[in-house]
Image (tube, helix red, strand yellow):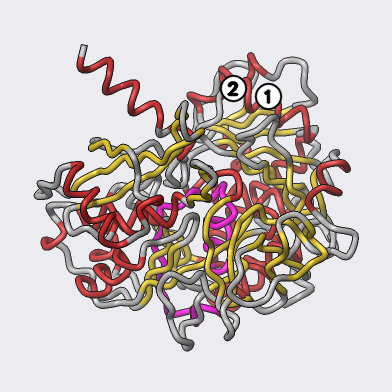
Amino acid sequence: MLNRTIGQILPETAARFGDRTALVFGGRSFTFGELEALTSRLASGLAETGVGAGDRVTLYAQNSWEWVVAYYAIAKAGGVINPINSMLTPSEVAYVVRDCGAKALFTTADGAGPILEATGDSDLREIIAFGRDAPEGASSFDSLLARGSADFTPVDVAATDLSTICYTSGTTGFPKGAMLSHRNVVLNAAMTAAMNMRVADDVQITALPCAHVYGASVMNLCALLGSTFVLLERFDAVEMMAGIQEHRATIMDGVPTMYFYILANPAFEDYDLSSLTRAVVGGQTMPAAKSEEWTARVGCPVLELWGMTELAGPGLMQHSYGENRLGSVGIEMPYLRAKIADSEDASKELPCGEVGELMVSGPLVMMGYYGNEDATRETIEPDGWLHSGDLARMDEEGYFYVVDRKKDMILTAGYNIYPAEIERVISAHPAVAMVGVGAKQDAAKGEIAKAYVVLKPEGGATPSDIETHCRAHMAAYKVPREIQIVDDLPTTSTGKILRRELHTLEAAAEIAAQ
């Protein structure tokens, strides 16, 4: 297992489970044998275009079966996979392409034209558009498949070689490319599967973007185990519930907002979700009240995890056979060590119960940031410990509790306030579907906490009701000084709440009131 590379996954699984359904997407299904043949043909076609060992290939598209085929084909051809957020603008894509020196890029037919214009002075030699048609200057995915051979032999690469460059969100400055080895990626997928007791007979469903390390880890573990991977193009509560019912999915992975939307959907009772035996959640902290509501209404536990792009996915998880401590992101995965360090002195480890920065080490940790030694040194200590940027604490039995992102902490009149703590309390109000808390500048206190609340369809709570609920469950200085009822919250492509964009809801409300 430890020596396996991404390009070796499908050949080995297809040899064992060739006729088993591997992928379901958009009404189509593919067996492992069919995926193995498709990825070999595409890898052969890529090789003909000049893509070889170590060449970077960018994947820029929403979830699709073509995306999955391209991912494994790049690995088989010996290339380095560069999966990027489908929400990036052409100019942002151009930055990433130039930064990593990509030789080829996969995208949609609609996206190919703008990319051709934006990347004219890059090293790109080939732009491949999914489907049969491609604009002038690009090749079509179907034509590349047609001229490839299913007898292609994967290029021999080492498990320690660079496999993937995943760019961070770039909320401050330019994004950084986290370099992941084949071992990082494959080992993370294998250990994620082990923590949740995932097996070949599982039917996995998700709408997580495959371009995100969490989505990629879920995709890879299914390919490793021989499980059926039911993939949605993007999240929609009704489509997710329908997919669970139709395919009798046994396990779902998602971010908290996906669970919030499902629980709040008026059609919830119309769908049979009883096939689910585990619901796994990551990306942001999951309020315990929502986990309890999910278990009560669906009948399966919610297992929380924590991870990073720089770890190729999860790092801390609730174990399916262990005690599921709600509010905790679980314990260390195998091959990972974690500790709580002093936020000002990384060499000082804090005792149990104290809040500090979560740091991790071990073979899941990335190789570094591509072409950015300064950022690598800032993030990885000389002894190998990686800074997460998350504030957390650990209890006496090794369960970790993420308090919040260091950058999201609100300093109000000298007090530290953590948005996630307020969000957990407000989420427990029976009328609340979801909530985001952000900082607002204040002349007297520096910053104050403001809560933006989405109510359930039948919810009739007022800001005053929410404030009363908060005062009953938290210290007075933590109670948000402003509460605004909104229709929805800004989120990333993975569904994470964008706290730094919450202030735009206030501006939108002011414009609407004029």
Q: Residue furthest top?
A: 514
Q: Position of residue 151 (x, y in %)?
A: 70, 58
Q: What amino acid is labelled 1 in the image?
A: Ala
From the top left corner, tell me how far across and down residue 256 is, in percent. 38, 56
The part of the chain drawn in magenta is 194-222
Tell me the number on the disc at residue 90.
2
Query: Mark 1 highlights which residue?
Result: 94
Figure quadrant of the N terminus = bottom right
Residue drawn at the location 52% of the way across and 25% of the way down: 111
375 sits to left or right of 64: right
Q: Measured along the vertical axis of the image, is residue 329 above or below residue 366?
A: below
Going by the image, does 276 lie left or right of 410?
Answer: left
Please tell me which residue lies in front, 481 or 247.
481
**Are the two marked residues, 1 and 2, in contact with CB atoms closer than 8 angstroms?**
yes
Instruction: Please name the residue shown 35% across and 68% down the image.
Output: 288
Q: Mark 2 is on which residue type?
A: Pro
**Residue 447, visible in the rendered structure:** yes
Q: Is residue 25 visible?
A: no
Q: Judge whether residue 201 is colored magenta.
A: yes
From the viewer's perspective, is residue 465 above or below residue 383? above
